[in-house]
Image: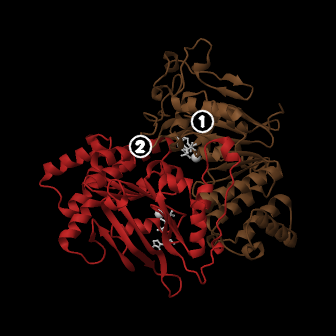
Chain colours: A brown, B red
């Protein structure tokens, strides 16, 4: 396999909150390869945003990287402290698009100026040249009549168009890695489909590595080459999109997929995950999902599982994959997925 | 059971709701919409943002006044000026659950007050003991502990807050509930819990729901029939599976084609259709609301009706 472009190892991120310490990221590891799309999925509060924000030095002031490393082009970003250091990364090497495009845009400045500014700052373009390129970019992200739109303000754009502008700004500097944090959650399905199409085509054209955060598994199936599943601040399983959707191995991934309404039977209760996510203020022993896993093993409560390899691309942090573990069958819904996949293969 | 034999609980007749527009002309947020909701069913209402879904829901709970048409509850008109007695009855029997459990709950009131609010408004309890008993029962029904009554909304998770919103509706002993995006702001794992709770309550209490959502996968799972609305006009209505399997209106087809499928093989080769309203030529041949196959209605003109009938075979 090629060398990773970004390599995160055993990352621990903590926040100080009213005198207490919260551990949001508990030893997460992930490699990103050139020009691939990785989706990060997991429930609310599992750490998807915090994990990726650390790569651009965008943690809130009460948070810090406690240990671990973030290697990008031979440099360890986990050791970066100053804004000056981060400015060499942010926007240039790694760019981020957030859920709400309004927060990313300045309501008092025209859309054109906001893109042009980035070009002037990072590419040293000036005047007419920068303006021409800005209009070209607006056209590239699918905005009709870009010349007329250049002089408009964000509130004159629809939600979908604003998100296109934010994406335009993010890719204006040709970053190596583009992180999209729930960029379509606030949009209608039809607009969402268009934005996904845009992101995919830009990704192909620019060869950028795309990290896509969402809890919509349908969107994951659309964009992802690989999927990383997050639970309680850890990546607990990763693999190709097909390995995760058709042959998941971690009980949390089983539960996540099983609760999809598409897999439910009408008139019968949907599968739902019992209990609540763990308290991140206290130390978690063993497998963090164990208390919510009806089939948890004894060891799950005692010792944190390491990654076990399922295939060259697929690994999961669950004791079920230990050769000594008893055989635990996945739920029926998951078996049905496996069967469906075997059907495709034939 | 054929639809003519079923009890109609809510009927909208040519419902029109207007808001002040930018110019002098009022803006029609809901434009001549008619449909019936039968007792015990879940009626799904889908459409893009701004299409008028919430406005219809708010018209039914009588927050939005009508510019035209009428709303019937069990055959009696409840829109406009109505007798006091009937007003009291529908205030109780028709409830609404809102999208954002955080914004819809009064943050400074305790759960006890939030859940009882509707009862206070209609004097719906004998004495303090009766009220407390009703609050406890409503909380238990949605899977919360009666002790939670003394807490504030911010001390609860999103799923628990949405349960408080449901308890607040249930305490009124409603027959019909408008559910406006009740699970959209919830996390995937909590969505299933709230959906299951709503189904259970429907079964045990014989409730009828108007379920507003733009998550079409959820609507497909929960709704018996679905109406599709585009820019204030109802464009198609059918039983859920019928609509998903045989959509006629080009807007419905575009909408359904865009739903993300959580299956990489299918999703990656999916074709998304784009709806272009100019595909209809309504200059001469005007559209009307017609039944193409039993129970499957669509807004179409004569030329389109022939086309859809041919598709139906
Ligand atoms: N500034 C902060 N101070 C304290 N805790 C924080 C802060 N920011 C995030 N957290 C906590 O870190 C954990 C991870 O949060 P994060 O925002 O990464 O979750 P997420 O997976 O992105 O969730 P969502 O799907 O809701 O966006 C949560 O428990 C959150 O409450
Ligand atoms: N109180 C109001 N005053 C003026 N216009 C309004 C008002 N309420 C709604 N509208 C407008 O009426 C139209 C329909 O709005 P409505 O909230 O019913 O849409 P919706 O289908 O519920 O959309 P969403 O999916 O975004 O919730 C929109 O154009 C909206 O801006
Ligand atoms: Mg997040
Ligand atoms: Mg609405």
Q: Under tag 1, what secondary structure?
A: strand
Dot 2 or dot 1: first in sequence order is 1
| Residue under numbered circle 2 | A267
The answer for which chain carries disc 2 is A
| Residue under numbered circle 1 | A230
Q: Nearer the viewer, residue A326 or A65?
A: A326
Q: Locate residue A154: give its quadrant.
A: bottom right
Indicate the quadrant containing the C terminus of chain B: top left, top right, bottom left or bottom right. Answer: bottom right
* Residue at (59, 23) in percent of width and height: A318
* Residue at (32, 62) in percent of width and height: B8
Relative vertical location of residue A86 with respect to residue B83 in this rendering, above or below: above
Q: CA distance from mark 2 to mark 1?
A: 31 Å
Numbered-mark total:
2
* Residue at (50, 39) in percent of width and height: A259
* Contact? badges 2 and 1 (CB < 8 Å): no
Relative placement, left or right, of B114 versus A111 is: left
* Residue at (66, 30) in percent of width and height: A342
Q: Residue most toward the left?
A: B126
Relative vertical location of residue A128 with respect to residue B173 in this rendering, above or below: below
Relative placement, left or right, of A30 versus A18 is: right
Can residue B15 be seen here?
A: yes
Q: Locate residue A314: give its quadrant.
A: top right
């Amino acid at each position: 396999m090629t060398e990773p472009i970004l390599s995160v190892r055993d990352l621990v991120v903590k926040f100080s909150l009213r005198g207490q310490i919260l551990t949001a990221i508990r030893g997460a590891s992930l490699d990103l390869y050139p020009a691939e799309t990785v989706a990060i999925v997991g429930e609310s509060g599992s750490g998807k945003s915090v994990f990726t924000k650390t790569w651009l030095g965008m943690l809130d002031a009460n948070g810090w990287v406690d240990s671990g490393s973030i290697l990008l082009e031979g440099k360890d970003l986990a050791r970066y402290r100053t804004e000056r250091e981060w400015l060499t990364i942010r926007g240039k090497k790694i760019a981020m698009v957030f859920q709400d495009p309004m927060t990313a845009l300045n309501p008092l400045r025209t859309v054109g100026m906001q893109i042009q500014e980035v070009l002037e700052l990072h590419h040293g373009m000036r005047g007419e040249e920068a303006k021409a390129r800005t209009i070209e970019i607006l056209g590239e992200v699918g905005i009709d009549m870009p010349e007329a739109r250049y002089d408009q303000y964000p509130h004159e754009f629809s939600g979908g168009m604003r998100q296109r502008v934010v994406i335009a700004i993010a890719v204006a500097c040709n970053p190596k890695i583009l992180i999209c944090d729930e960029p379509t959650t606030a949009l209608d399905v039809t607009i969402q489909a268009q934005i996904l199409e845009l992101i995919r085509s830009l990704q192909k054209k620019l060869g950028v590595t795309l990290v896509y955060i969402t809890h919509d598994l349908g969107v994951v199936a659309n964009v992802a080459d690989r999927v990383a599943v997050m639970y309680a601040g850890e990546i607990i399983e990763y693999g190709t999109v097909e390995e995760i959707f058709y042959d998941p191995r971690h009980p949390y991934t089983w539960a996540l997929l099983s609760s999809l309404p598409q897999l439910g039977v009408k008139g019968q209760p949907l599968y739902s995950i019992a209990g609540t996510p763990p308290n991140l203020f206290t130390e978690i022993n063993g497998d963090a999902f164990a208390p919510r896993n009806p089939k948890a093993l004894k060891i799950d409560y005692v010792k944190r599982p390491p990654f076990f390899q399922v295939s060259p691309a697929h690994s999961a942090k669950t004791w079920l994959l230990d050769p000594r573990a008893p055989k635990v069958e996945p739920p029926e819904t998951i078996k049905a997925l496996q069967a469906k996949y075997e059907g495709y293969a034939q | 059971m054929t639809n003519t034999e079923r009890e109609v609980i809510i009927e909208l007749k040519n419902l029109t709701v207007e808001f002040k527009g930018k110019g002098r002309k009022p803006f029609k947020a809901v434009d001549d919409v008619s449909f019936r909701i039968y007792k015990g069913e879940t009626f799904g209402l889908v459409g893009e943002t701004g299409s008028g879904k919430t406005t219809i829901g708010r018209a039914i709970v009588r927050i939005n006044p009508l510019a035209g048409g009428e709303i019937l509850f069990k055959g009696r008109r409840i829109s406009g000026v109505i007798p006091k007695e009937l007003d009291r009855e529908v205030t109780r029997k028709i409830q609404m659950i809102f999208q954002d459990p955080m914004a819809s709950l009064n943050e400074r009131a305790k759960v006890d007050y939030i859940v009882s609010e509707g009862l206070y408004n209609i004097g719906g309890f004998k004495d303090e003991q009766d009220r407390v008993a009703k609050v406890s029962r409503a909380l238990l029904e949605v899977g919360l502990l009666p002790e939670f009554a003394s807490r504030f909304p911010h001390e609860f998770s999103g799923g628990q807050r949405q349960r408080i919103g449901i308890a607040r509706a249930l305490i009124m002993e409603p027959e019909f509930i408008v559910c406006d995006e009740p699970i959209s702001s919830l996390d995937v794992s909590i969505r299933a819990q709230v959906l299951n709770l709503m189904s259970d309550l429907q079964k045990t209490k014989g409730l009828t729901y108007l379920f507003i959502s733009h998550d079409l996968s959820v609507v497909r799972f929960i709704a018996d029939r679905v109406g599709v609305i585009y820019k204030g006009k109802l464009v198609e209505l059918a039983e859920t599976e019928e609509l998903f399997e045989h959509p006629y209106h080009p807007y419905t087809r575009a909408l359904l084609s865009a739903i993300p499928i959580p299956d990489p093989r299918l999703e990656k080769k999916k074709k998304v259709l784009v709806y272009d309203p100019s595909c209809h030529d309504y200059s001469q041949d005007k559209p009307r609301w017609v039944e193409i196959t039993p129970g499957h209605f669509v807004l179409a003109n004569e030329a389109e009706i022939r086309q859809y009938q041919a598709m139906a075979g």
